[in-house]
Image (spheres, helix red, strand yellow):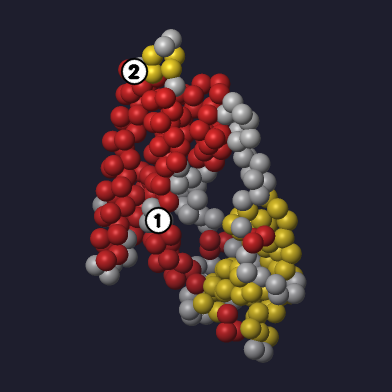
Amino acid sequence: GSDLASLQTRAAEDGDYYVINGQKTWTSGAWLANYFYIVARTDQQAPKHRGISEFVFPADMPGISRIPMIDITGTEAWNDVFFDNVRVPKKYLVGEKNRGFYQIMHQLDFERSGMERLMGNYPLFYGIIKFVKETKHNEQPLSRDSLIRNKLAQLQIEFDVGRLLIYRVAIVMDEGRSPTYEAAMSKVYCTEFEKRLANSAMDILGPYGQLVAGSKFAPIGGLAPDSYLASKGYSLQAGTTEIMKNVLATRGLGLPS
């Protein structure tokens, strides 16, 4: 979450092992995982931003259990994973002990920079353009409707701007720098684009846009409702839009924190 320093999961040293107890929420694809990545508190006495460490270890270790988390689209995208006296060999520690918080702050710049923030729903964008070209209303293609044309033209403008922001992030990484505020800017813009795309698709498709995959009447293979429902979480994942704007303000514009 956005308050990593308040985590409660603990990893206590015991000889050549860490004994982990706690819970990890929003574990993507846990039912398929061969390894788990977790962050745990390794020093209970240190200030909350210190004393945190990272681990990666096999998912089949004794003491690990999970329960599914069904999201608003009806999909098991995440799991709650529980760790009860899980003995993890010290070789699975990532980086330095008690430096996990600072390592993660650096890693997040790269997580937020992915092109999936823009391209995740590109099949829907492509599909809606194809739909309005091929679908007629009153014997005229929907593509002749000025409101629809305006919506799609605006989305294309925004898509190209998002692509340029992603290219900028890639250039920064090629130069060997961490894309701190560049990634934050790209994520804010691109995830908001994804929301606008989903909203526009539902507007254009009308009531049929609510039909899910499997219905023979669902346009574009039923992509629209899943995209619409899931899009509300895009600006939360890997840091909320509000936090991204704070990163941009402090590290990009030099404003006081």
Q: Circles 1 and 2: CB distance less than 8 Å?
A: no
Residue 10 appears in view = no
Q: Secondary structure at mark 2?
A: helix
Q: Which residue is mark 2?
A: 144
Mark 2 is surrounded, within 10 Å at the Cα level, by few (under 14), some (14 to 19) or many (20 or more) other residues, namely: few
Percent coordinates x, y for residue 22 in the rendering? 68, 66
Q: Secondary structure at mark 1?
A: loop
Residue 45 occupies quadrant: bottom right
Residue 88 appears in view = yes
Q: Nearer the viewer, residue 196 or 10?
A: 196
Which of the marked residues, 1 or 2, is nearer the chain's N terminus? 1
What's under tag 1, amino acid-wise? Gly
Numbered circle sitting on residue 114: 1
Specify the quadrant that holds the C terminus. Answer: bottom left
**Which residue is at the far bottom?**
15
> How far apart, in angstroms, are the residues tagged by discs 1 and 2?
35 Å
